[in-house]
Image (spheres, rainbow, N blue to C red):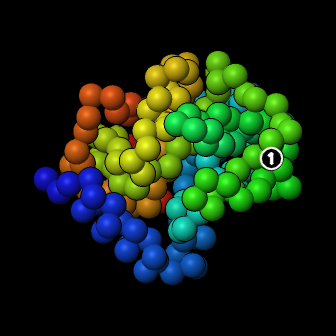
Amino acid sequence: METKADIRKKVFRLRKEAGRTQIIRDSRTIAGRLFALPEYEQADWIYLYIDCRNEVMTQEILSESLARGKKVAAPKVVGKEMIFYRIFGEEDLEPGYFGIREPRPHLDVADGSSGLMVMPGVAFDRQRGRVGYGGGFYDRYLAAHPNLFTAAVAFEFQLFDQVPREETDILPCCLITEKQIY
């Protein structure tokens, strides 16, 4: 099995090489699959990462969720923790941790008691094993907020036969790609 470092290097290269048209098209397909989930339909709160560097794009999920009257929260890294703040649109975001857009500081904190979390990852396997970016932010947040339904999103090229797992890893409830839901 490849190491997490090798997997990250490979996926970062593949994401960099992916064409903008493909990223946009596949992100729309993934968003459509997410919108069709009963858990999405029932959720009042959507906890949503803000994409960067050719991740699955989340702008459509943000816009559609707000249009459907859902409350949307985005993450901000504070020290070793991740805190989600309620946002009302793109204007509530500013450059933050590693240049990733984050909520502005004046916004209200979302309590994480219920809802659906759309989570990123560098790589996955079909059993929903996940390799993140190495900070453990999502695993710690989900351990403290166990009532959230988690939907990871990724492109098929981010899938591996098997990815390394650690005891502290929390598997997403489902993994959505442009081809299917695992």
- Which residue is pictured at 35% across the width and 44% down the height? 130
**Depth check: 161 or 91 in front?**
91
Rendered image quadrant of residue 44: top right
Which residue is disc 1 drawn over? 104
Other-residue count near label 1 (Cα within 10 Å), few / some / many at <14 / 14–19 / ≥20: some
Q: Nearer the viewer, residue 154 or 79?
A: 79
Question: Residue pushed farthest left?
Answer: 1
Tell me the amino acid under the disc marked 1. Answer: Arg
Residue 160 is left or right of residue 181, and the answer is left
Q: Quadrant of the C terminus?
A: top left
| Residue drawn at point x = 53 percent, y = 43 percent | 119
Give residue 69's position: percent from left, percent from top: 84, 37
Q: How many marks?
A: 1
Q: Is residue 166 above or below residue 61?
A: above
Nearest the viewer among 23 and 102 is 102
Q: Is residue 21 above or below residue 153?
A: below
Quadrant in which residue 127 is drawn? top left
Indicate left or right for 87 with 112 as reference.
Answer: right
Question: Which residue is rendered at x = 56% and y = 34% of the image?
Answer: 81
Q: Residue furthest front?
A: 79
The image quadrant that residue 5 belongs to is: bottom left
Can residue 152 be seen from the camera position used here? yes
Q: Residue at image x 31%, y 41%?
A: 129
Q: From where the camera sits, is residue 68 visible?
A: no
Q: Relative to the observer, which residue lies in front, 60 or 36?
A: 60
Measuring from the top left, give residue 55's x and y in whole percent.
Answer: 52, 62
Seen in the picture, residue 135 relative to 83 is either above or below; the reply is below
Q: Secondary structure at mark 1?
A: loop
Residue 37 spot, x, y in % from top left: 58, 38
